[in-house]
Amino acid sequence: MRTRLLPLLIILMAAVLLALGVPLAVSLAAAQQQKVVVDRIDDTAYFAAMARSAMDAPEGPRDEGRTLSRELESYHDVYGIRAGVFLPDEAVLANAPKTWLLPGSGEVRDAFEEALLSRRSHDPRQVWPWQRNRLVVASPVVRDGDVVAVVVTDSPTGQMRSRIQRGWLVIAAGEVAAMLLAVGAALRLTGWVLRPVRVLDATTHAIASGALKSRVAAAGGPPELQRLARSFNEMADNVEGVLEQQRAFVADASHQLRNPLAALLLRIELLAFELPEGNQEIASVQAEGKRLAQVLDDLLDLALAEHTAADLRLTDIGALTAERVAAWSPTAAAKGVELSGDCPATTAWVDPVALSSALDAVIDNAVKFTPRGERVEVAVASNGDSATVVVADHGPGLTDEELVRIGDRFWRSGRHQNVKGSGLGLSISRALLSAGGGSIAYGHRAPHGLKVTVRVPRSEPTA
């Protein structure tokens, strides 16, 4: 969520900063140019006054014209600005440098013709730092209401563009600093908002994995998320209470039913002595009674497995698996099934008793459903942070629909209803493994058969 929320916040903040920075940069450039234009207007007004004095002098404009020429030359030498006073017929009254004349077209010509209309030329177009344009300003010299001359200045823009560029650099530095500050604030904000969400997600995953005691710790964040965390803890408490009542009921019911069932089986055996030997009805009743006793024992084992905490130890699961393979080999041989094991030394953090019980259930299931003459293979391997025990048989296997349901309580394939069992063995195995952070998965084995993968962690569990 953070990878989606943070870019959105950054884009929004960048858009806001650009919306503020671009007009500020444009305003700075316009202000710098306006300052130069105002200076040129003052200069042209000064030279216009000198030109008017030269043209009004009683001794003629020659001496005043020389003074005007010297002022223009000094002005050009100091500032590098071309300036000239031109008569309406485009004759030169004074100019600097001497080679600078009115062009036939362009901004200078346009400004000159506009000033002949007895008004100052319009402000020049905005000059940007990447342009090398010049600023042209023209002012009319008016006498008795008539334009008798025009003062034109043609200014370079290098210094102005440098000032604009420096101002833009300052604005850009401020924008970058503001952006970095905004990104830091966004990181803090998203962390503050999403930290309770991450805690809630981790706790939900832990509860889904079987750690029903997990709760959402107080992690700050908005008040709405804090209320959500409290509501989640209350819900988890209620769910745990209901499951605990269910486990207690199953355990108590199984325990309470065992004694009367044992007494009933004993009376059935006593009754069998009074009946003819080989009576099919009494044999069937005894078989169903023993099956019912097995179901009660499995229910009690399942309730204990879901309730008891795992005693995790660093264990050589290769040796433990080899031991279970050796223990089941006589049973497999009696059924005509070959049971083989590839069990290299591999350590993992498991509850040895729980893993042994789970392997017993898985191997028993594989041997039970494997036809005579086929084989069951058990292999131990390590894969990064986990170790696996794979039990693969050459039996009929299961369909995709059956693989989804395998491991559910009391579920058995419709094709194997006549095989001895209660349908609780794999459920007990899953509960035993989940308590220690392990898992059990089922899949197809090519070309036929079932592959069961028991996975346990190799890293030491954290508190």
Image (cartoon, grey):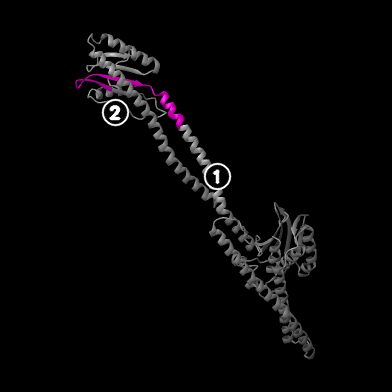
Is-magenta flag for residue 142? yes
Quadrant placement of the C terminus: bottom right
Residues in magenta? 139-167
In depth, the one of 38 and 216 nearer the eye is 38
Farthest residue toward the front? 58
Image position, residue 334 (x, y; %): 78, 70
- Of residues 175 and 68, which is closer to you in this image? 68
193 displayed left or right of 155: right
How dense is the environment of label 2, judged by Cα within 10 Å: few (below 14), some, or many (20 and up)? Answer: few
Q: Residue at x 42, y 37 (%)?
A: 22
* Res 311 → quadrant: bottom right
Q: Name the residue under label 2.
A: 122
Q: What element carries label 1?
A: helix
> Is disc 1 surrounded by few (<14), some (14 to 19) or many (20+) residues within 10 Å?
few
Would residue 171 appear left or right of 453 to someone viewing this image?
left
Q: Residue 225: give x, y in percent of width and height.
A: 55, 59
Q: Considering only order in the chain, which callout, 1 or 2, is on the residue closer to the N terminus? A: 2
**Residue 373 visible in the displayed image:** no
Q: Residue at x 72, y 81 (%)?
A: 289
Magenta run includes residue 113: no
Q: Residue 28 carries which label?
A: none
Q: Is residue 457 left or right of residue 22?
A: right
Gap between marks 2 and 1, in whole Å? Answer: 48 Å
Residue at which label 1 appears: 184
* Residue at 73%, 86% in the rendered image: 280
Q: Quadrant of residue 73?
A: top left
At x 47%, y 43%, the residue is: 14
Question: Looking at the picture, how far across and down is residue 366, in whole percent?
Answer: 71, 66
Q: Position of residue 68 (x, y in %)?
A: 30, 13
